[in-house]
Image (cartoon, rainbow, N blue to C red):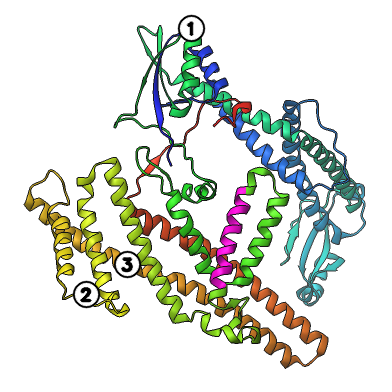
Amino acid sequence: MIVPMVKYSFVLYHKEYESFLEKLQELGMVDITIKDWEPDDKERQMVSSIEQMNKTVDALSKLAKEKDEGVEVIPYSSAEEALHKYTGATEELNRLGSEQARLEKEIKDTAPWGDFSPATLIWLKNDNVDLHFFTKPANEFRKILPQWQQEYIVEEINTVGGNTYFVVVGREGEPVRIDAIEVKAPDETVEEKEVLLARIEAEIKAQNDILLRASGNLDEMKVLQKEWKENLHLSQAATTATKAAEDTLVILEGWSPVEEQGRVDSLIEKASVFAVKDEPQEHDDPPVLLRNNRFARLFEVIGNLYSLPKYGTADLTPYFAPFYMIFFGFCLADAGVGVLYVIAALIGLAKLPGKYKPFAKLVMYCGFSTIFFGFISGNMFGVVLPELGIFANYRDYFLTADNMFMLAIGVGIFHILYAMILNIIFTTKYRGFRYSLGLLGWVIIILSGLAAFLLPNLGITNFGTSSVPFWILMGVGLVLMLFLNSPGKNIFVNFGSGLWNTYNNVTGLLSDVLSYIRLFALGLSGGILALVFNKLGLEIGDTLGIPVVSQLVTVFIIVFGQGLTIFMASLSAFVHPLRLTFVEFYNNAGFVDGGRPYNPLKKEKNNNNV
């Protein structure tokens, strides 16, 4: 559900409003409306510092996970010092990394020339002797060398990687014209460059030690990170306030949950602040705070991938939550994979920090659904359960592919009708019953048609396409959807709108129902792919005929194939239920998006107040 909000309009003397905002921040209950925020220089610097801190915390979090458990880290005296050291060390590491890459390339380029004396090269140059350094493919060098030696003094130095490195001796200022690649004369020996490289590597290690030490301040830096964000939020609220009476008065708009208004009222009274309290109006944009039961709360993260609902409309999280879990299991439909999901979730509940435990619970529920659908469809890691001897007496209880297909269609129809009924309920609640009459007509027609089709097949013959009750219901539905779909408009506009809606709804509902066939298709394809990898591994192993090697190859193919299948099937099981939720369900349930999250001014110590 969406927590009801109360609107506060604060009128403050300009010298008091900053201290009042600090009190609101201490309370941690009021979301101040921030409009048309343009950061000043100070706030831009705050944003920059926060971005730098975010990058630092992310990098140090990874470093803390990668470090050896036995390594003792002595933290810096403060988070600010650690941030300063980290920033300086990363800048120095970037410079050293470039220098290291340059030296490694130079060592690679210099190594083929062997041991030489740079001083001798300088002495020869001073004596009017110029050495030209060349390289050429070895096979071409051998062919053309005699021709070059007739005109120049050519000295072969080395042959590495199919290329010959050689020197041509000439007089300074005289060009050497040969068909080869001339390279720059080495200015230092390999040994000298390796000494420099070792020095660079030592400096890199020293800078990495600084980063490692900074990771010891990670918890303090996370606290400082939150403080900076809180300070920026406070500054945003202060700078976007409306000023009046020649800037002597400041007007603030804030929102608080209705259930917490007593605490806010108490603060207002103590601070002697003038405030007007009111209910949200149609033109307002209240923040959205969701509050659901323990099960539905796990699925809020799924709904947030799309959007928060608009305040004043329905939160559909409790209504799509069980269906998302069902669809996930239907798409994956592998009892073995479901068991792996549950085991992974139980490990997560035991090992993960508290803030990640809800994700582990979500995985566990989806795992249970996967076990159920995998078992009733007879699939476990590609093994067909009905064909096992242990299930010989229960084969008739497993669902066939045809059964799963019809189940997918039936679930889809029910899901869409459920969404439409919710739409009727919430439209009646938030707008009035007359605005739901057109949709109610559609629901009556669809339910009547389904009943007329299904009931005779179940032996109930007094309600069919030829019965009076059927045509009465169809008539009522047609009147509602054709003539009462747009309250306040004349009968001709309603009729035209009804005909247009008929076309859209018929094509749209048909398309929506067909989308649920993918539940069956994805579950079936995953099982078939796993079965194919199992057979492939066994057949290739039998073909090899080498006992140990055959078994290893069989195990590798099966494990690799099952891993690939689990990855692809899990991805599909995550994505397709999202589509069914955000497209088919949200559309038919009348979901209204665009809600902004409830973000009250607060201090770190108040984060758990709401």
Q: Would you say 586 lies left or right of 57 here? A: left
Q: Is residue 605 above or below residue 312?
A: above
Where residue 337 appears, as percent x and y from the top left, is 62, 69
Residue 15 is labelled as 1
In three-dimensional space, the C-alpha distance between marks 1 and 2, rounded to whole angstroms, equals: 79 Å
- Span colored in magenta: 358-374
Point out residue 228 in the picture as x, y percentages from the top left corner. Answer: 61, 27
Q: Nearer the viewer, mark 1 or mark 2?
A: 2
Name the residue tied to disc 2: 462
Residue type at numbered disc 2:
Asn
**Crowdedness near tag 2: few (<14), some (14–19) or many (≥20) residues, C-alpha within 10 Å:** some
Rounded to the nearest angstrom, the CA distance separating label 3 from label 2 is: 31 Å
Q: Amino acid at mark 3?
A: Ser
Task: Looking at the image, tell me whether mark 3 or mark 2 is earlier in sequence order.
Answer: 2
Residue drawn at x 73%, y 83% as measured from the top left: 554
Foreground mark, 3 or 2, reads 2
Query: What secondary structure prevails in the magenta region?
Result: helix
Q: Relative to residue 490, is residue 248 depicted above or below?
A: above
Mark nearer the N terminus (1 vs 3): 1
